Amino acid sequence: MPTPMPVAHVRWTLLGVMLAMLLAMLDNNIVGTAMPTIVRDLGGAEHLSWVVTAYTLATAIATPVWGKLGDLYGRKTLFQASVVVFLIGSLLAGAAHSMAQLIEFRALQGIGAGGLGAGAFALIGTLVPPRERGRYQGMTATVMAVGVVGGPLVGGLVTGHLGWRWAFYVNLPLGLVALVWVQLMLRLPAPPARVRPRVDWAGIAVLALAVGAAVLAATWAGTTYPWTSWQIVALWAVAVLATGLFVLVERRTAEPLLPPRVFTGHRNFPLAIGLLAAVGVVMFGSALYLPLFQQSVQGATATSSGLLLLPMMVPVVIASNIAGKVMSRTGRYKVFPVLGTLLLTAGAALLATVDTGTSRFTAGCAMALLGTGLGFTMQMGTTLAQNSVDLRDMGAASAAANLFRTLGGSLGVAVFGSLFTRAVPEGATGEAYRQGVASGTQHVFLTAALVCAVAFLLALSLEEVPLRSGPGGAATKQPVTRLSTKSPADGKG
């Protein structure tokens, strides 16, 4: 058995992995800040939404593909390949001379970003057994917080001083450092030998159709087209039919893209996926509508839009660290998603009561509840999903977790957008606009509270089984025992 890797070395190794993951998290926020300048330079304002949609769509479709290919051909190699694709996309996007070119290159970026998210969590799952994950949980939470808070700040600074093209070029030095870091520091065992690994091309095609239709329906519903329009209804019909066909294809192929055994092996996996979808709803919705409420109703400045989310993001880091340390020390974890979803429900319910007279302190307290709930739930959901599968399926399981979090967020934002638009009178200004934004925010977070209440019921249904403390299979139905904590083994799941 290989000598256990010291905790300090694991931290240094994971730092390079998370640096690459930070690329994808920062990118959308940086680009969002630069969008007004991009439109003034390139024109094509009527196609502006596709700059975001192309990226999101490509990311969602590519995520499970990268995850499965990593399981088949080696996670380190595929992760590095995704970094290279993302950097090429960034370079080309920065050099774009038309909106059409920018949209194409954003799609290429999105393909790479799908591998960054799926690959990073798969590598973490391979390097660090679930039982030891708590030692490093705070690192992941910190990266996410930096991505959400730092993106708008970096975007405003770079765009204002260097021009919008540097909103893309800024990825290059960071990505190159991550690429070299991973090459030098990351050591993994060779993937298990397979006779002629087969790529599930049929599964890829059908899943791309299902995910693409769902993301487009979620993106366009209530904005580009009404929810009941034939376009949206047709897209949802395609998504449902393609999903059913995908299930049939996966049951018949030798190397399924998302193996059915991942979803049926242990009941904690689908429950964890449901928790992560709810987390996506809260994260996407909060990042979009809380700054809008603070700016439009409470008078905060747009230049500090990233800092407006600090009352939520700081508790994410603190709560994630606390939950991780307790989990690693005691082996117990169910209390955290249960408490986390309860706090998410309470925080969202409080934000559903805001009005034009709500103080920043009151809103900040509600945001702190949301942040604490996210900290207790977000990383724990990923850990439980990975603990429920065999090491051979780590990439597919990690990709599924990322995919459902993205889909949950996309669908949530679509519903929120429709509710918010109805609450804000068209052409409203002044006090009427402030009242409309406050009312729209209430509707958004009332819906989020209902979603979180369902997630609370899912958390109650989790089965507390032992977390793997080394290589081995999926979770088994054994009582939780107090295990000794050891340094994670090099390359073990």
Image (cartoon, grey):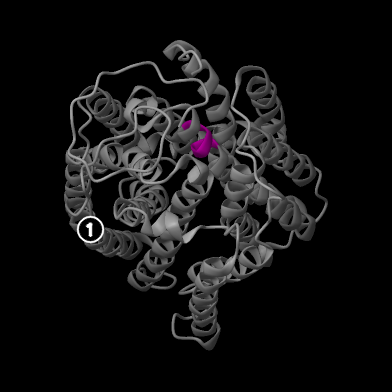
Q: Position of residue 249 (x, y in %)?
A: 57, 71
Prevailing secondary structure of the magenta residues: helix
233 lies above or below 416: below
Secondary structure under the numbered disc 1 in the rendered image: helix
User: Which image quadrant for residue 144?
Assistant: top left
Question: What residue is drawn where x is 57% and y is 59%?
Answer: 256
Q: Position of residue 406 (x, y in %)?
A: 47, 54
Residue that carries the numbered disc 1 in the rendered image:
449
Q: Nearer the viewer, residue 473 or 371?
A: 473
Horizontal placement of 416 versus 5: left or right? Answer: left
Q: Nearer the viewer, residue 231 or 299?
A: 231
213 lies above or below 481: below
Question: What residue is drawn where x is 33% and y is 29%?
Answer: 317
Tally the numbered discs.
1
**Quick one: which residue is furthest to the front in this view?**
195
**Is residue 392 within the magenta segment?**
no
43 lies above or below 160: below
Q: Quadrant of the C terminus?
A: top left
Horizontal placement of 350 versus 74: left or right? Answer: left
**Kind of residue at disc 1:** Ala
Q: Nearer the viewer, residue 197 or 400?
A: 197
- The part of the chain drawn in magenta is 120-124
The crowding category of the residue bearing disc 1, from other C-alpha atoms within 10 Å (few below 14, some 14 to 19, many at least 20), is many
User: Which image quadrant for residue 80?
Assistant: top right
Quick check: can you spot residue 394?
yes
Q: Position of residue 78 (x, y in %)?
A: 67, 39
Horizontal placement of 1 versus 179: left or right? Answer: left
Question: What residue is drawn where x is 45% and y is 38%?
Answer: 148
